[in-house]
Amino acid sequence: MLQAFTADHVFPVSSPPVKNGVVVTDERGEIQGVYTKEQFAAEKFSEKPVLQKYSGIICPGFINAHCHLELSHMRGLLKEGKTLPGFIGEIIKGREADKEKIEKAIEEAEAEMIANGIVGVGDICNTTDTIFQKKKGRLRYHNFIEVFDIVPSKADEAFEKGISLLQKFNETGNTGSIIPHAPYTVSAKLLKRIYEHAYTHDSVLTIHNQETATENEMFLSKSGALFEKLSSFGDLYKNWKHTGFSSLASTLAHLPRCNKTMLVHNTYSTQEDINWAHLYSSVIYWCFCPNANLYIENRLPDFHTFINSSCRIIIGTDSLASNHSLSVLEELKTISANAPFIKLETLLKWGTLNGADFFDWKKDLGSLEKGKRPGINLITDVNTATLALTETSIVKPLLSR
Ligand SMILES: [Zn+2]
């Protein structure tokens, strides 16, 4: 049975928006085509689908490129505006909780993502906590197995722990890769193990990047609030050597330049950082989690600079420890409110097709194109005259995957 959906505008994302467009799918949600109103009226379907009319816009399902589903029980636990060094200590304390509470929060957070029109997730994993939920197959995931240890002599141990965690996550039927946490928590030796594994398996990489100004300060001069916070946990950082370069330049040089690499946050990345990254690798993706940036540092990346440098931009929600919701639309609304010069068409591409491209999910997700099953979202309360999101824009999935 064919189904047809229409709204004020349809955004296939892979092609320009269609005013009063119509999306036709089969009963499984596979796209049969996107038509203008006139084309739809003239098309000879085997059976004429009943047209479901909505006000607002229609777009494909969202890709949440950066999440920590296992931290969902920490919703509302940490105070806003503590800055990253303050946040680090709190998160270590706060993640301890009983199994039942952790699992219930994971289940609810995943349901929240589905209700918010998300169809695919890049999820950071430090524990086995989310495996039970991922086995249910309700959402597509790429599991980023996160490893960290700043002491070079412990690099092998940290890496092997990551390998055994990855093997457990492989049972969920999702893809996965081993990735470093952040420039300031991994040794060059550990990065070498990650490099070799990613290179051999042709896997995608990600790393938290320049989330706080003091991250650069640490690499430039072995000082600042982040360095002091990390040093307060013992003498782990006593023998750590700063490079005299920004944290991004210092770390990226240890990662393979031919593997797709997603840099997350980039709140304090400069034009020089972007130039350097693009010179080093042609497969860099820049992931923004603006609501988490506001939650922790009360600052946003300079979107203008990234756009002018032709960056491939994707969107993440980060975790419920540092965000009020897991919604790609809420992230896009924040960007739109702070950078109104960015067109809705561009924002939607960041939240759908670019993420699908990073994870190699483009074959069936990311755009409304014939043969794909990307999920179909309706966004209401959009300013249809200027084609812009508003403060009250809401997403409702018309078809999940
Ligand atoms: Zn994160």
Image: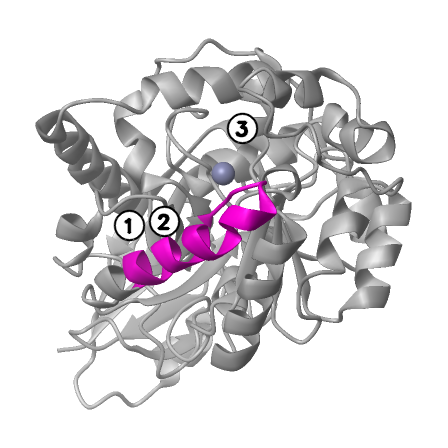
**Residue matched to label 3:** 291
**Callout 2 amino acid:** Leu
**Residue matched to label 2:** 378
Q: Is residue 147 left or right of residue 135?
A: right
- Which element is circle 2 on? strand
- Looking at this view, is 244 or 45 the one in front? 244
Percent position of residue 160, x then y: 38, 59
Above or below residue 78? Residue 386 is below
**Residue matched to label 1:** 397
Q: Is residue 390 left or right of residue 249?
A: left
Count of numbered marks? 3
For the record, the magenta segment spans: 147-166
Q: Residues within 10 Å of mark 1 (few under 14, many from 20)?
A: many
Q: Residue at x 53, y 19 (%)?
A: 233
- Looking at this view, is 188 or 364 the one in front? 188
- Which element is circle 3 on? helix
Q: Is residue 320 magenta?
A: no
- Looking at this view, is 162 or 331 the one in front? 162
